[in-house]
């Protein structure tokens, strides 16, 4: 757990954050002994504007003291919004930051008129799965990802136009 007294900020993508974004995701991949593939599977991390922003989605960096500690992205899939690249460095987990980034995604998805939020998550990321369930997502299936490790993933979804309320993130981080 991080002992810093400063609060991280969720900031929209800027080119200056790109090396930190790639470093966070690579660190998590190393933590789980997954294959880092910058020339193919992780190419989107080097083409963030083209892949996410210019297609109607977003990419944000969670920054603490000018260091990227987490990432979250979204893709516009028509009626569905898909959360992508939700990663957080191990030393910063357990502070509500994953939830903060997911709530940001959900707020964006609602604001942009999506009916459903979807997420796919490697079956090894148990903490993320529990967070999705606590936030009201339902597990909807599984698949094998077309990545170098042929990673098995769980699918999750959340209906967005069902009258559910957006959670007060600031309140949740303080409790």
Image: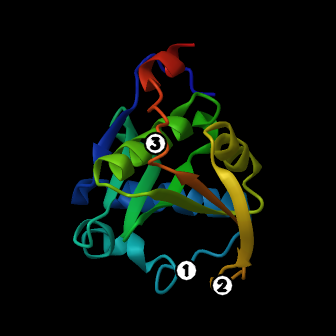
Q: Position of residue 153 (x, y in %)?
A: 71, 69
**Residue at the (51%, 14%) spot, across then down:** 174
Q: Nearer the viewer, mark 2 or mark 3?
A: 3
Residue count near mark 1 (Cα–Cα under 10 Å), binned few <14, some 14–19, many ≥20:
few
**Residue at the (32%, 55%) spot, across then down:** 113
Q: Which label number is shown at residue 148? A: 2
Gap between marks 2 and 1 measured at Cα: 8 Å
Q: Position of residue 80 (x, y in %)?
A: 44, 65
Q: Position of residue 17 (x, y in %)?
A: 31, 54
The residue pinned by badge 1 equals: 37
| Above or below, 102 relative to 148 | above
**Residue at the (66%, 84%) spot, across then down:** 148
Gap between marks 1 and 3 measured at Cα: 24 Å
Residue count near mark 3 (Cα–Cα under 10 Å), binned few <14, some 14–19, many ≥20:
many
Q: Which label number is shown at residue 132? A: none
Q: Quadrant of residue 58?
A: bottom left
Contact between labelled residues 1 and 2, with CB atoms less than 8 Å apart: yes
Question: How many numbered discs?
Answer: 3
């Amino acid at each position: 757990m991080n002992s810093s007294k400063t609060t991280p900020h969720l900031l929209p993508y800027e080119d200056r954050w790109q090396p930190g974004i790639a470093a966070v995701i690579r660190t998590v991949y190393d933590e789980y002994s997954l294959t880092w593939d910058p020339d193919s599977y992780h190419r989107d991390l080097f083409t963030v504007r083209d892949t996410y922003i210019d297609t109607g989605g977003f990419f944000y960096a969670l920054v603490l003291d000018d260091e990227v500690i987490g990432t979250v992205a979204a893709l516009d899939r028509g009626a569905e919004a898909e959360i992508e690249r939700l990663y957080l460095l191990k030393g910063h987990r357990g502070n509500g930051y994953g939830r903060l980034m997911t709530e940001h995604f959900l707020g964006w998805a609602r604001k942009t008129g999506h009916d459903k939020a979807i997420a796919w998550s490697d079956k090894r990321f148990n903490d993320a799965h529990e967070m999705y369930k606590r936030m009201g997502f339902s597990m909807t299936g599984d698949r094998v990802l077309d990545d170098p490790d042929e990673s098995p993933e769980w699918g999750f979804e959340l209906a967005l136009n069902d009258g559910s309320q957006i959670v007060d993130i600031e309140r949740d981080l303080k409790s």
